[in-house]
Image (cartoon, grey):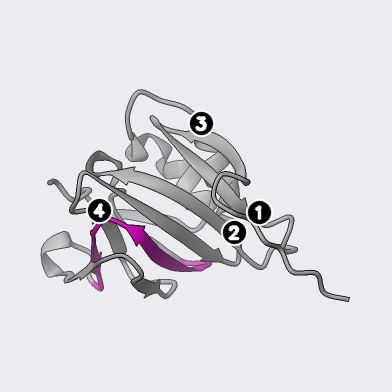
């Protein structure tokens, strides 16, 4: 028998990731590895560097604010650029380079990864005074993620 999972905002598990707090809406354990879902309130400084996943597809649902997505090249300058507002859905298939950054001071975004194994990376980084992705390049590589270029700058 299948049981639906309903989780309203604020009902997930919260944890520190660099200098922000993420809400684990759905964990890979709850979905038997199929998916992990995070709810983020992103600031412009929270943008990850341009990167590529080799093991999972990634989707985003913009809940509030406006978010710019770069995708399709190993350099920011070579990427296609797309802006997404509230209600937008964005899909990033595995192996396609991408990054994203709020255009507004903050944006609320659901981040969905299929399968959900990458959840272990986010939880293992822990708190820090700011993002330092290059400090975790070896850990990222263990999760099949390659850093390609700098993070976008507002």
Mark carried by residue 101: 4
Front-most of residues 116 and 42? 42
* Residue depicted at 24% across the width and 39% down the height: 45
Per the rendered image, the range of residues in magenta is 54-72
Q: Are marks 1 and 2 in contact (CB under 8 Å)?
A: yes
Which residue is identified by label 2? 36
Please tell me which of labels 3 and 2 falls first in the chain.
Answer: 2
Q: Work out how far the residue at label 3 is from the one at label 1, CA to CA, in angstroms.
A: 17 Å
Q: Work out how far the residue at label 4 is from the one at label 1, CA to CA, in angstroms.
A: 24 Å
Residue 20 is situated, as x and y percent measured from the top left of the image, at 40, 34
Q: Work out how far the residue at label 4 is from the one at label 2, CA to CA, in angstroms.
A: 20 Å
Residue 51 can be seen in this image: no
* Residue depicted at 71% across the width and 63% down the height: 5
Decide if residue 64 is on the left or right side of residue 4.
left
Residue 21 can be seen in this image: yes
- In this view, the residue farthest toward the top is 129
Question: Which is more foreground, mark 3 or mark 1?
Answer: 1
Please tell me which of labels 1 and 2 falls first in the chain.
Answer: 1
Residue 95 included in the magenta stretch of the image = no
> Which quadrant of the figure has residue 85?
bottom left
The kind of secondary structure the magenta stretch mainly shows is strand
Q: Is residue 56 above or below residue 141?
A: below
Q: Work out how far the residue at label 3 is from the one at label 4, CA to CA, in angstroms.
A: 21 Å
Please tell me which of labels 4 and 1 falls first in the chain.
Answer: 1
Please tell me which of labels 4 and 2 falls first in the chain.
Answer: 2
Which residue is identified by label 3? 126
Q: Secondary structure at mark 2?
A: strand
* Residue depicted at 46% across the width and 59% down the height: 111
Position of the N terminus by quadrant: bottom right
């Amino acid at each position: 028998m299948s049981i639906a999972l309903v989780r309203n905002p604020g009902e997930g598990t919260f944890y520190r990731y660099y200098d922000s707090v993420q809400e684990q809406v759905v964990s890979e354990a709850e979905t038997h590895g199929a998916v992990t879902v995070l709810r983020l309130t992103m600031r412009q400084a929270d943008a990850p560097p341009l990167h590529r996943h080799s093991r999972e597809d990634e989707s985003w649902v913009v809940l509030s604010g406006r978010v710019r997505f770069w995708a399709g090249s190993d350099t920011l300058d070579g990427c296609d650029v797309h802006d997404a507002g509230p209600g937008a859905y964005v899909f990033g298939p595995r192996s396609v380079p991408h990054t994203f950054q709020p255009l507004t001071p903050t944006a609320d975004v659901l981040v969905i990864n299929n399968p959900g194994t990458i959840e272990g990376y986010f939880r293992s980084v822990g708190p820090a005074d700011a993002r330092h992705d290059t400090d975790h390049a070896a850990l990222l590589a263990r999760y099949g993620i390659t850093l390609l270029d700098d993070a976008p700058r507002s």
